[in-house]
């Protein structure tokens, strides 16, 4: 068991942990929506999820970029960063 754990990169592990946390938050939100069983409460919970989603996206992308920083040239890293920026702009509008 130690062999495969040693082979996992720390950046990938951080990204996986954030995505698992995100999934648990989504499942918890769905359970809360079912518990309250009203549309207005479900919309309130969904609005809270709208805040969590982009935070998880930015965090996982940041970890990934930090993990790639030593493997990419500055120009490629800049292009990836611009791509992330365009995603965030697209989400905002």
Image: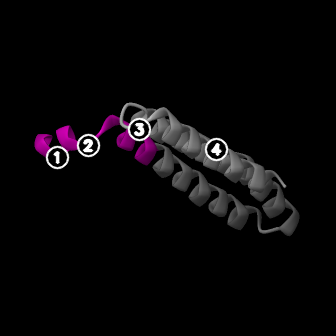
Q: Would residue 86 be counted in the magenta stretch?
A: no
Residue 45 in view (yes/no): no
Q: Quadrant of residue 55?
A: top right
Q: Dominant secondary structure of the magenta stretch?
A: helix
Are circles 3 and 4 on residues that touch, CB within 8 Å? Answer: no
Q: Which residue is mark 4?
A: 82
Location of mark 2 (residue): 8
Disc 1 and disc 3 in contact, CB within 8 angstroms: no
For the residue pair 76 and 24, the one nearer the viewer reads as 76
Q: Residue at x 50, y 42 (%)?
A: 76
Q: Is residue 87 above or below residue 64?
A: below
Look at the numbered discs 1 and 4 and tell me whether their residues touch, using CB distance below 8 Å: no
Name the element at disc 3. loop
Quick one: SS at disc 4? Answer: helix
Counting residues from the start of the chain, the first of labels 3 and 2 encountered is: 2
For marks 4 and 2 on the same chain, the one whose residue lies earlier in the sequence: 2
Is residue 26 toward the left or the right of residue 40 in the image?
Answer: left
Magenta stretch bounds: 2-17
């Amino acid at each position: 068991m130690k062999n495969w754990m040693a082979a996992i990169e720390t950046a990938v592990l951080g990204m996986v942990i954030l995505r698992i946390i995100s999934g648990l938050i989504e499942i918890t939100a769905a359970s809360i929506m079912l518990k309250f069983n009203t549309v207005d409460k479900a919309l309130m919970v969904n609005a809270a999820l709208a805040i969590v989603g982009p935070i998880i996206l930015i965090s996982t992308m940041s970890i990934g970029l930090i993990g790639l920083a030593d493997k990419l040239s500055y120009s490629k890293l800049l292009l990836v960063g611009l791509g992330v920026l365009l995603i965030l702009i697209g989400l905002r509008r």
